[in-house]
Image: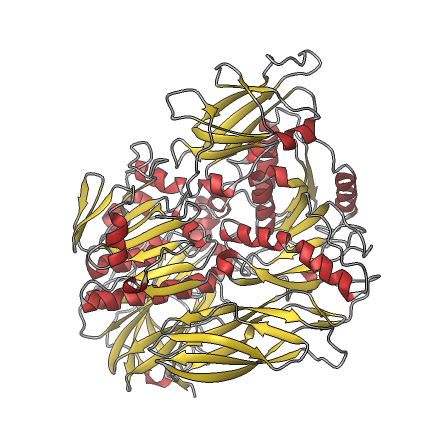
Amino acid sequence: MLVTLRLLLHLSTFVFASPTAQLAFAPNQATTWTALGPFPLGSREGPLLPPLLPNLTRRLHPSPLADGGYIEAVEVQEDSDGWVQVGAENIRWQSLRSSAGWSVLQHQVYYERVLSVGTASLYSLDLDTAAEFSILKVGSDPSERRWYNGNMYGYPEAAPHFVELERGDHLITVTFAYDLRISGDSGGDGIPRSRWRLVVEKEERQLSVDSAKTVAPSVVEGVLMGEVLGIELSNRWRDEIELLCVKSEHGELKVILPAPVKLAPLQTRLIALSVHQKRPLTPAFKGHLPLTLLVSRAGVKSSLSTTIRLPVSRLSTSEPSPILSTFLSNTDTPSYAVYTPPKTATACSSVALLALHGAGVDPATSPSWTSSIKQREREWIVWPLGLSAWGYDWHGASVKDVEAAISHLQDIQRSWKRAHGLSDQSCPRAKKLVVLGHSNGGQGAWHYMSHFPDRVLGGVPASGYVKIQDYVPYHLSLGQHYRDPTLTGILSAGLSPFDEDLYASNLVGILILNRHGAEDDNVPVQHSRQLVSIIDEWSRGNSSTIYSEVSGAGHWFDEVLNAPIVNRFLDHLISHSNRSQLLTNALEFTLTTANPDESGSKLGFRILELEAPGRLARIEVEVYDLSKSPRLVEDPRIRLRTTNVRSFSFGGAVFEEALGFLPRALAIDNHSPIPLTTTTTTFSTDGSNPFTIHTPTPRRYGPLISILSSPRPLVLVVGTSGSPSTTRHLTSIAERIAHDAYLYGRVDCEVVRDDEVDETPEGNVALLGDSYANSVTARWAKSWPTPVSFVSPSAFAINDRLFETPGQGLLFLTAHPSHPSSLVLVLAGVGAEGLERAARLFPVRTGVPLPDFVVTAPSMTSGGVEAAGFWTSDWAWSDKASY
């Protein structure tokens, strides 16, 4: 039974004078907090900065937001449901906004109180819609403070943090960050308002199953629309638990656990199961599927029973409704998408529509979204989740989920036909996609089209933004007031792979209908206008982008993706699906990328490696005018000029399909033409000599958030070679990383001790602890190519610079020792505070500018960061892109 501790919480004993600029909260008789704020905060920069820990024995605290420049702490109370209302009424927000823009509304507020624990036990702490909280037992050394990320997006029924608390008083701090992307603009009075809640409950030791978090496919006419199930298990024991097998009590369905799965202490995982259908389910099946789980803990086996529910539908082929189907996605985690069949049940179109939702939208529970595009006569519509309702802004790991949903389309087509007694002959894989999206999904449509131009036929982005730095501008960053501008620039380059404006050259020749409401109060309309302008510049006035600005319309409006202009555009686009991207015989275009891992080809040209990671790479392509140039072997047909390209490939088949001929040679960077002998050719250079035909083994690229994109579960290796306190600390960090990765993007993690790692894991690996605390770090450091060394248990060096100040934390990427398609991240720090700073910086949300490596600073006077940068293409030190 859960026992609430709300009555055991009481205010710490501080005395405060009347504030000069106080916060206004709804009055109530519930628990009291001490609050101090608001303070400025740049967009998404919280993890980069030292944690907000003001000295409350000080009466006045400077804040640029307040009249007079100073604020005082006040006491605030929870309402009857435990919510703390946020809204500083004595701040002249409208005046601030008139000069600094709406990004000035972003701010942070500090809260604290004391939690009195009567019984040492396991407790769950669930922080809803606030940034982070910390726990420190009263009287302990400050280095014992631990930081936990909150559920910023307010995901319902999200797994809480499980924390072992000793008997006694514990100081709890909460940092609330007002994020415009989450909380929206201020209300009619101009005051940015929100709320947050921290729920603390005592937990029983158990293995629990959350049936509400089941991932399950639809059942249509007795046929499963997917062969993957996902069940959420939460281990609240101090011991590791192993799930050995799963049995189903249903005769028509066989459920299999592909391999035993381990849950680390206090870990929550979404377990992937395979389900095979022996025969069609009868009409009596109501969707309930009983399961028995056989588990082992400390050598003792036991069983656990649960029931999951499969959504049952009766759908006709003449008027089909959207279908929920399941598959394995990024890190092999169970995921799902919604699919809308075409009106013609037997249709096998070479084109599919891809619809990307806005922030906070789940296609499985949002019929208004999955009905916003008119059903097609022959084409399927795919509505992916993107791993979660916010996901990663349709970047990185969310793109992996999109690709998994598209790859699964053939399976769902077969199941759909089988459910209606039609031939289950599979359709060919969709050759081209038409990408549509709204709001964050509109930005996602721009992102997908600009990063994978050969995969798309065209698209309809609606109400999308250029990039996160322009949506809620970063110009009010706190760190920039202290940090060397060169270092700030290097940090900013960590976001360049996600900047649609930098990739706009790839959109030349692609038919796009861009929609936006003229009165949009969420994503300002100038974002679409700006992108249209950039594409026009790259197209030299011959743009194939159509701009549709809807007068009087806001952010979401009726027929945003279902207006006559949209349907006519889609009909025209698909009916000309064999049309080349090239509008004339004479063409020039530029292919751009900042991260070859997460971008594809344009007309067969694809950049594979960068000469200097952290900088843009481009290939300028000039196709000869065929009416004036005879087709001779010595005629190169195509001239290329490269910038920051180490290797690239040319897929002749794609080019030939588009232009009707295959080039016989390429002239690269004004050197002699290189004859082409195959349809796919790879060219590389060492930087000082001309390109030659050579096939290298491309490496994985950063930035740091790329660690979340993995073909297998992310393996967190906990160091146990150091002191017992360090081992406990690293174990706590692993628990928190696993929690946050699952919360924000369903990234599946395997938590293992360093002494358990014999074989090298296939997927991405995070090594927690330096070579003195982690034996795997020590072993792999002997051969890794990065210039990072650990010179003592309290010091590390990067290139020729030594870091030994307590509070300096380190995160860096390096090459995987045996799998070039995977990455390794190392987390270390000087002392316990350095480890905590590094742990706070582990990437779990988008928008935080993190390149290949970052060293945190212990104080604000360095802007939170001591050093950062990108490695070279060989993982060595880069003078060009490091600080």
Residue 582 locus on image (x, y percent): 67, 27
What residue occupies the far right of the structure in this picture? Answer: 318
Residue 53 locus on image (x, y percent): 27, 62
Residue 106 locus on image (x, y percent): 43, 54
State whether residue 62 appears in this view.
Answer: no
Q: Looking at the image, which is closer to me, 539 or 326?
A: 326
Residue 540 locus on image (x, y percent): 61, 24
- Tell me: residue 673, above or below residue 260: above
State whether residue 627 appears in this view.
Answer: yes
Q: Looking at the image, which is closer to me, 345 or 502?
A: 345
Residue at 81% x, 51% y: name it: 377
Q: Looking at the image, which is closer to me, 92 or 34?
A: 34
Where, by quadrant of the figure, is residue 765 drawn? bottom left
Residue at 45% x, 26% y: name it: 643
Does residue 631 appear left or right of residue 719 in this picture?
right
Where, by quadrant of the figure, is residue 288 drawn? bottom right
Residue at 61% x, 48% y: name it: 442
Does residue 263 appear left or right of residue 534 in this picture?
left
What residue occupies the far bottom of the structure in this picture? Answer: 1
Question: From the image, which quarter does the N terminus lie in?
Answer: bottom left
Residue at 70% x, 23% y: name it: 584
Does residue 619 appear left or right of residue 583 in this picture?
left
Question: From the image, which quarter does the C terminus lie in?
Answer: top left
User: What's the image's color scheme?
Assistant: secondary structure
